[in-house]
């Protein structure tokens, strides 16, 4: 399992193209990274000093206090996916659990009269 994760992480950094290696399109994270966790869906979560970055392999989404994170800064090695597949993040002000149901709140279409 650890070897598979290592290879997946290396694949994020480099893609094999013929005989040469070229950089992959990885998320642009300019802040210090305190942890990297892979969830059951294969998304990678990066804990930083300005929140959490979720990368689905193509798009990065940033979660901060504004999106409901307990604190602005994550703690070193404080990302965990539990046995039920829930993501937990330890921050400078408490613990948060990611709830996918609240990630995309449906916005009703405007009423036209």
Image (cartoon, rainbow, N blue to C red):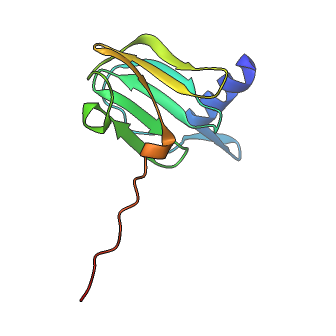
Which residue in the rendered view is the most extreme toward the top? 76
- Taking 97 as reference, is 35 above or below it? above
Quadrant of residue 30 within the rendered picture: top left
Where is residue 32? Give x, y as percent.
Answer: 33, 20
Where is residue 50? Give x, y as percent.
Answer: 28, 26
- Taking 90 as reference, is 11 above or below it? below
Where is residue 94? Give x, y as percent.
Answer: 33, 14
Which residue in the rendered view is the most extreme toward the bottom? 113
Q: Residue at x 40, y 43 (%)?
A: 61
Where is residue 19? Give x, y as percent.
Answer: 70, 42
Residue situated in front as seen by the camera: 32 or 101: 101
Q: Residue at x 65, y 33 (%)?
A: 40
Q: Residue at x 63, y 28 (%)?
A: 85
Quadrant in the picture for the C terminus: bottom left
Q: Residue at x 36, y 33 (%)?
A: 29
* Visible residue check, residue 68: yes
Residue situated in front as seen by the camera: 49 or 72: 72
* Visible residue check, residue 26: no
Quadrant of residue 111 within the rendered picture: bottom left
Residue situated in front as seen by the camera: 17 or 33: 33
Residue situated in front as seen by the camera: 58 or 94: 94
Quadrant in the picture for the N terminus: top right
């Amino acid at each position: 399992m650890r070897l598979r994760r290592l290879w997946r992480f290396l694949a994020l950094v480099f893609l094999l193209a013929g005989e040469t290696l070229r950089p992959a399109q990885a998320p642009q994270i300019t802040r210090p990274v305190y942890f990297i966790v892979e969830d059951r869906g294969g998304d990678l979560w990066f804990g930083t000093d300005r929140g959490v970055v979720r990368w689905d392999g193509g798009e990065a989404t940033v979660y901060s206090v504004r999106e409901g994170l307990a604190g602005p800064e994550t703690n070193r090695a404080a990302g965990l996916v539990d046995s039920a597949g829930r993501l937990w993040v330890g921050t400078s002000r408490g613990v948060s659990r990611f709830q996918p149901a609240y990630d995309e709140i449906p916005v009703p279409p405007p009423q036209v009269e």
